[in-house]
Image (tube, coloured by chain):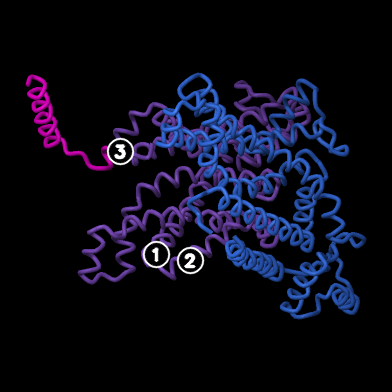
Chain colours: A purple, B blue
Amino acid sequence: MLLSKATTAAVANAADRAQTEGRSLWKDARIRFFRNKAASLAFYVLIAITLFAIFGGYLAHWDNETIDWPLMGNVSELGGPSFENGHYFGVDDLGRDLFARTVQGTRISLLVGIIGALIAVVVGTLYGATSGYYGGRVDSLMMRTVDILMAVPFMFVLILLLVIFGQSILMIFIGIGLISWLDMARIARGQTLTIKNKEFVEAAVATGVRPMNIITRHIVPNLAGIVIVYSTLLIPSMIITESFISFLGLGVQEPDTSLGALISKGASQMQYGVIWQLLFPLFFFIITLFAFFFVGDGLRDALDPKDR
Amino acid sequence: MLSFILRRLAVAIPTMLILIVISFVLMFAAPGGPFNNDRPLPPEVLANIEARYGLDQPYIVQMTTYVWKVVTQFDFGPSFKYRDQTVNDIIRSGFPVTLVYGFWSFVVAVTVGVSLGVLAALKQNTWIDYLAVGVTVGAQVLPNFVMAPILVLVFTLWLGWLPGGGWNGGQWQYLVMPVIALSTSYMASIARIMRSSMLETLNAGFIRTARAKGLPMRRILWRHAMKPASLPMISYLGPAFVYMITGSVIIDVYFSTGGIGQYFVNSALSRDYSVIMGITILVGALTIGFNLLVDILYAWIDPKIRL
């Protein structure tokens, strides 16, 4: 009796509260996200890295192309990290300021990751939603195409592409964009299949909305949750892909650089006692990836609580 | 079973053709031919050379001849840069190397990954689990091109235990670092997948029944849990194979093993199209063949798939 009274009170109380502060899906997700300590820490780290990539150049004492001639001949002894000569992260093998180079590399790596993910989101979501919505023969044709493309070892084709059309950042964007949408298309299709029989889609069909409008206005917005989660996880894998190519020397070319190119340079120089040339880019590479993975995991838990 | 395999082949063959067409179209789109040097050859000489390599034929003829030779005689044609070497010579000298450490990496990734995942699932929320999860999360951000320099730094420069590169006929000292560098991040993925699917399986009704009947845990694990729990891991093997074969390029270049990836990058840098294309097609065929195997394995293990 007492218990049931307490329960009713609690329920009434909860009902009251629900009325006073109505929570939208997104607010709910935000609260859940920031309750997750690792994810919120990663989120702030990510903001810090982004700020570093955008504004880090203003902190640098040197720019990324100026060669510090007195250091150049004796990088291993004089070129280490120091505050006195303004090379906070030391200099690279040519005597250029590694701090400025790291800022530049981080910026390009982030850019590649974000743009690659953006292409994947736009192309993949539309493709997957279309395929899932139409179903039947269209669906099986579109999805078989994805299956076929997925079985192609794309890194080799991408390298072929870079070799033939020249190595530029634009070409890397195109190449990475070509690969990245496949997974997204599959995920979006799967989600569309569960959405398309819901009442609001039926209502739209009944009122005579054209299929393409149903897809863009009714289905795609409802894919937002899973698309956001997946694209945060896609960004680090795009960064890895770009770094992979740059590590081989086939990616971004001098004077541009990326974290992968810097790691490659550092790795080839490390036996000369200039270990900082490897460690600083590596540090930024690893914490960037970590931050994206944790934010992605946190978002997944926040947006889809029943998933785990 | 046969019709299932045939249906898979029906997907595999167009995939292969698409790959060949893509590589060909890219190659034809490339500005300049392989014999356009800085010092132009006299036109008659150029015409002779091009006739020797069949480059004076229409594109479609070149493509069909190429495909025909590859399919019937396994002949990838001559290298454009190294006149005395055919693409087959290059594959013959580089491929076995890649195959050896690729095989070991695969074995290491699967065995260590599966055992780590199962162990973590069995001892959920103990220090073993936390350790395993920590290792897999850490390894996620250590792709092969990060792992390789770190390993060389520690084991060659600091400790001096292992040679920093080379192959030497595949002695174990030369194998250790390539295998670790290539397998780590896939090992982590396999462990993660295995852990979550094993947890799911262990909570399933049929496992509870088996426990209620008093079967020992070891028997439950091997007879009942292992098969259904390994399905997600098996479907990951296909992509893992692609990643590994791609990663082998880094390993070959970084450790100078003389494997196929080293030739690939060198010919990419010197624009030796026929070598690039031969390797791309070979790798594509391997990938498709492997995916076919994985599909068959999956269908064989999964009782839900009726053939």
Q: Earlier in the sequence, mark 3 or mark 2?
A: 3
Is residue A107 placed above or below A34 in the rendered structure? below
Whether pointer 2 and pointer 1 mark residues with C-beta atoms closer than 8 Å, the reply is yes
Q: Earlier in the sequence, mark 1 or mark 3?
A: 3
* Tag 3 subunit: A
Identify the residue position indicated by label 1 in the image: A130
Along the viewing direction, whichever of B114 and B63 lies nearer the viewer: B114
* Tag 1 subunit: A
Q: Earlier in the sequence, mark 2 or mark 1?
A: 1
Dominant SS type (magenta): helix
Label 2 residue SS: helix
What separation in Å lies between label 2 and label 1 (alpha carbons)? Answer: 9 Å
Q: Residues within 10 Å of mark 3 (few under 14, many from 20)?
A: many
Tell me where residue B181 sits by quadrant. Answer: top right
Q: Amino acid at mark 1?
A: Thr
Residue range highlighted in magenta: A1-28
* Residue occupying the point 44% across, 46% down: A230
Q: Amino acid at mark 3?
A: Ala
Tell me where residue A243 sits by quadrant. Answer: top right
Instruction: Give the position of the N terminus of chain B as an image quadrant.
Output: bottom right
Identify the residue position indicated by label 2 in the image: A142
Which numbered circle lies on residue B16?
Answer: none
- Relative to A294, A108 lies left or right: right
Residue B239 in percent (x, y) is at 59, 49
Residue B189 in percent (x, y) is at 56, 38
Residue B64 in percent (x, y) is at 74, 75
Q: Residues within 10 Å of mark 1 (few under 14, many from 20)?
A: many
